Image (cartoon, rainbow, N blue to C red):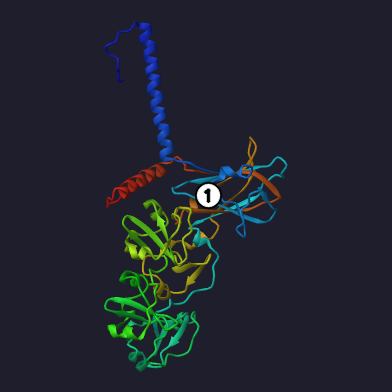
């Protein structure tokens, strides 16, 4: 045993007392170290929502709400009606304990049921109608050639019309009748002097797109063009071509859901907005890939309105594309819905970067429990998280169906990790990965 007082001589009685206190001190330090290590390697995370003190809920992720999205602030839950609450957090956990504290005048919530789904929040959106090819895409089927123009499928009258306008036959994507059926058919392209909307051009290394009013829209950069289209979609023209057209004032930026960077900052593009990502861990935990980042100029950045910081609780914006690896299906987020992109060719017309990988099984209920009365008051139940381990996303959505009309004072969620050797190894591995990611070390265990 380490002795820091070798030079001090004590009598037998005080020596015994000293050794006892010394042993106690070492035991206390050892126990404290184990206690701290336990919470590092087997952490818990707690979320609490108080219906009696709403001001204490600032920044809380629980967000209890009705089916139409209205926040529940009075703690009232109607019998048989679905309500929702959610959390978003990083980490691997073994179980969730859900606790409800009913108002003293409320009926019992016993046997009321709770279901769990886990994924990315946007992927849990309701599903809308399928989406066809992106505007500007060139497709062919058998001997027919088409341009997707202003949301319509326009067929070239014949090959001579196609060649006269300057389109290259090799640029057209071979597809089938089913893929074409998702885009309504419009009138044929017969005029060899007027370009349909969404025709693409390249003039002195600058890219343009024709609009519905007959003008040209300029892409802000080659990077912006290639975030949306293949190089061979653009018809080469000389500078004289511009004399016949007005050029719109506002340039076209990057494709929706593009990842761009300026300086040390990274952003997500959606419509005319950009969402700054402040933390590398958030970037990775929201499913993005560093290889997809496009360097933007300050002028390009100025085309967008900067929104609030994109965090773990943020919803993926419009234009985001998910790929369900278990069903091999693609989905695009638009206006609070996810829309299937019915084939790989259709998906590729929209996507020029990695999609965000998900599992279609995460759309299903992955766990559930019924509230039971606890010994010291309150009602609680446990949901094991075994079936959620391989699902991507850090968003947990709970569906609550009250058995009786209830008034709840407090809602509590406690995420726990079981003390097992497997969880210890996983915690150590994740710690090493975070250190390597933070300091730019490429290799990983």
Q: Position of residue 59 (x, y in %)?
A: 52, 47
**Residue beneath label 1, please?**
61
Does residue 71 appear in this view?
yes
Residue at the (37%, 44%) spot, across then down: 425
Q: Position of residue 413 (x, y in %)?
A: 55, 45
Q: Position of residue 323 (x, y in %)?
A: 43, 65
Quadrant position of residue 217: bottom left
Residue at the (71%, 50%) spot, across then down: 405
Image quarter in which the N terminus is found: top left
Instruction: Identify which residue, 45 or 74, lies in the foreground.
Output: 74
Q: Is residue 149 above or below residue 276?
A: below
Q: Position of residue 387 (x, y in %)?
A: 49, 53
Using a 10 Å C-alpha cutoff, classify the residue at mark 1 as few (fewer than 14 neighbours), some (14 to 19) or many (20 or more).
Answer: some
- Relative to residue 344, is residue 432 drawn left or right? left
Instruction: Identify which residue, 291 or 305, lies in the foreground.
Output: 305
- Relative to residue 95, is residue 351 drawn left or right? left
Does residue 322 appear in this view?
no
Q: Is residue 249 above or below residue 238?
A: above
Instruction: Identify which residue, 260 or 88, lies in the foreground.
Output: 260
Mark 1 residue element: loop
- Relative to residue 351, is residue 121 drawn left or right? right
- Relative to residue 178, is residue 67 drawn left or right? right
Residue at the (35%, 94%) spot, across then down: 160
Quadrant position of residue 427: top left
């Amino acid at each position: 045993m380490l002795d820091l007082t070798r030079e001090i001589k004590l009598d037998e009685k005080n020596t015994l007392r000293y050794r006892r206190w010394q042993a106690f001190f070492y035991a206390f330090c050892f126990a404290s170290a184990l206690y701290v290590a336990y919470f590092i390697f087997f952490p818990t995370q707690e979320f609490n929502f108080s219906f009696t003190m709403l001001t204490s809920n600032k920044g809380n992720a629980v967000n209890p709400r009705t089916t139409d999205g209205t926040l529940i602030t009075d703690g009232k839950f109607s019998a048989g009606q679905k309500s929702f609450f959610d959390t978003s957090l990083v980490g691997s956990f073994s179980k969730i304990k859900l606790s409800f504290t009913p108002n003293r005048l409320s009926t019992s919530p016993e046997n009321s049921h709770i279901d769990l789904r886990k994924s990315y929040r946007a992927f849990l959106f309701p599903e809308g109608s399928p989406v066809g090819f992106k505007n500007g895409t060139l497709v062919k089927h058998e001997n027919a050639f088409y341009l997707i123009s202003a949301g319509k499928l326009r067929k070239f009258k014949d090959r001579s019309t196609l060649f006269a306008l300057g389109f290259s036959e090799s640029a057209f994507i071979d597809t089938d009748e089913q893929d074409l059926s998702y885009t309504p058919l419009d009138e044929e392209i017969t005029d060899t002097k007027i370009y349909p909307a969404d025709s693409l051009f390249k003039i002195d290394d600058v890219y343009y797109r024709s609009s519905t009013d007959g003008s040209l829209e300029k892409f802000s950069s080659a990077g912006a063009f290639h975030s949306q289209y293949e190089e061979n979609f653009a018809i080469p023209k000389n500078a004289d071509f511009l004399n016949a057209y007005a050029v719109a004032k506002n340039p076209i930026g990057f494709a929706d859901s593009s990842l761009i960077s300026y300086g040390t900052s990274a952003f997500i593009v959606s419509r005319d907005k950009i969402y700054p990502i402040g933390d590398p861990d958030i970037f990775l935990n929201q499913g993005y890939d560093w290889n997809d980042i496009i360097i933007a100029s300050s002028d390009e950045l100025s085309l967008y309105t900067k929104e609030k910081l994109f965090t773990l609780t943020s919803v993926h914006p419009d234009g985001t594309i998910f790929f369900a690896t278990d069903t091999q299906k693609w989905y695009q987020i638009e206006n609070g819905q996810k829309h299937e992109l019915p084939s790989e060719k259709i998906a590729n017309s929209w996507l020029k970067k990695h999609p965000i990988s998900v599992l279609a099984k995460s759309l299903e209920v992955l766990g559930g429990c019924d509230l039971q009365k606890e010994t010291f008051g309150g009602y609680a139940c446990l949901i094991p998280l075994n079936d959620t381990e391989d699902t991507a996303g850090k968003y947990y959505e709970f569906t609550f169906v009250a058995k009786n009309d209830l008034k709840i004072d407090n809602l509590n969620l406690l995420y726990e990790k079981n003390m097992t050797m497997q969880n210890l190894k996983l915690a150590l591995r994740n710690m090493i990965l975070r250190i390597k990611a933070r300091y730019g070390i490429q290799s990983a265990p």
